[in-house]
Amino acid sequence: MKTYTNSVNGQSVEAADHQEIFNPATGDSLGLAPLSTESDVGSAVDAARLAQPGWATISDQERRDTVARVAQVLEDNSEYLAELITREQGKPLSGPGSRFEMQACVGWTQVPAALELPPEIVFEDEKRKDILHRVPLGVVAAIAPWNWPLMIAIWQIIPAIRMGNTVVLKPSEYTPIATLEMVRLINQVLPPGVLNTVSGDGRIGAALTSHPGIDKIMFTGSEATGRRIIEASTRNLAPITLELGGNDAAIILPGTDAGAIAEGLFWGAFLNMGQTCACIKRLYVHESDYEAVVGALSTLAGQMPVGDGMDESNLIGPLQNEMQYNKVKELVADARANGCEVMEFGNMPDTGYFLPLTLVGNIRDGQRLVDEEQFGPALPVIRYQSVDEAVASANGLGAGLGASVWANDPEQAQQIALNLEAGTVWINQHGAIHPMVPFGGNKNSGYGVEFGLEGLKAVTQPRVISVKK
Ligand code: NDP
């Protein structure tokens, strides 16, 4: 059985303990992932601290060139890593699956490599000149989740190193292998110590985020763990970028052509089997359009090939882990027990964490499947009578990551969009993120933004040089 390793100071590091990782589609063993200790966390942070001043003092152009070489490594190893993602995380190779995740990794590396944050004259008169420089924070702790394990790790790692920080990354204990392999490969073109890993469960995450040698924390995951990380950061006062998922509402305006939007709605809700922070998790449909929308989505759901994602004909895979599988099942069972109409589609394989693509009708706000983030392939479709009522429902929960408005007239949709409490409101699309466009949550979905120039600023601190004339 293959044993995978962490990377510290450019070296592969053997661990004393391991956990076996299994394919969520087949139950097959994938190998042994290392389990770090708290002392390993200390060694990784030390390596990152040692490497940071040197990495920060090379020229900006040299760092950009190095990040561009990282993009090339990702591109050259895309197929190897995509197959590992499919085996470990479950999303299929095809469609918006693991090859798509690898394309995103390349894109989200190329863009920061091309961006610059030059010093900026923020004030000047006859007496003084004030120049704002953006300097690195130091060592960044990156805590990645299991749903898009490589892509989200890249979102955290790349801006950080681009701006002269060094990184200690902890992948999720559910999906460590593909991430550790990606880091091993990337390290071929990075100086030792710039990118290090530790692996293990939440205790290792807690040891990392509370470590006094950490200067910034990047976290994507649940609200509950986000709150724990805020508490942990009182030990090091590290600023945090928190992306805590959401319970995104989509509102279809009355009279919208259901056929024209069905495919966008479907993937907006069922991308990665719904295990995506900015997926449609509540669909609000005017009562007069309800039958047409449910009909169009049912047709698509019924046609989707489901199964082991290594088979290139499949577009829908399993849930990633038992915890998530049980959570989604429980929420659907609760809806069924409360009289909702549960519509299930797809022929599920017998093995693995497969759940049917599910639409749930006759459901209202206040029921668990609507109010709690399901993070899985079960979409509540809620009838509304007035657009004001739908907007109030969309804003009625604590989450505020994304939202969308669907309409024949995008101008009309934009007026509604301005009233939705979310970091991004998409029109006639959902979850359409881009490496140049800032992304982050409102309300309980976290704070700080990633991507683009704003994302680069978030991994720097301002230093003003103020000159008397
Ligand atoms: P968590 O937030 O617990 O996990 C996310 C990451 O945080 C993982 O790497 C995890 O490690 C790590 N972690 C756990 N505890 C700590 C801690 N105390 N300090 C630092 N890091 C820690 O989410 P879960 O995986 O438990 O999923 C629960 C729910 O969260 C899901 O059902 C879903 O609703 C939501 N979620 C949202 C995501 C998003 O994209 N916004 C991604 C994943 C989940 P480890 O896995 O090793 O415990």
Image: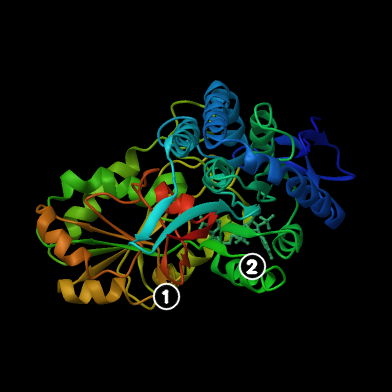
Q: How is the image coloured?
A: rainbow
Using a 10 Å C-alpha cutoff, classify the residue at mark 1 as few (fewer than 14 neighbours), some (14 to 19) or many (20 or more): some
Q: Farthest residue toward the top?
A: 76
Residue type at tag 1: Gly
Q: Would you place residue 356 above or below residue 249 in this image?
A: above
Name the quarter where the C terminus is drawn.
bottom left
Does residue 391 appear left or right of residue 18 in this picture? Answer: left
Residue at point 71%, 34% (across, down): 30
Q: Which of marks 2 and 1 is nearer the N terminus?
A: 2
Q: Nearer the viewer, residue 195 or 267?
A: 195
What is the CA distance from the residue labelled 2 to the residue labelled 1?
19 Å
Badge 1 element: loop
Q: Can residue 457 be seen in this view?
A: yes
Residue type at tag 2: Ile
The x, y position of residue 176, in whole percent, is: 68, 43
Q: Name the residue under label 1.
A: 398
**Figure quadrant of residue 302:** top left
Q: Would you place residue 147 above or below residue 95 in this image?
A: below
Using a 10 Å C-alpha cutoff, classify the residue at mark 2 as few (fewer than 14 neighbours), some (14 to 19) or many (20 or more): many
Disc number placed over residue 272 in the picture, else none = none
Disc number placed over residue 229 in the picture, else none = 2
Q: Farthest residue toward the right?
A: 16
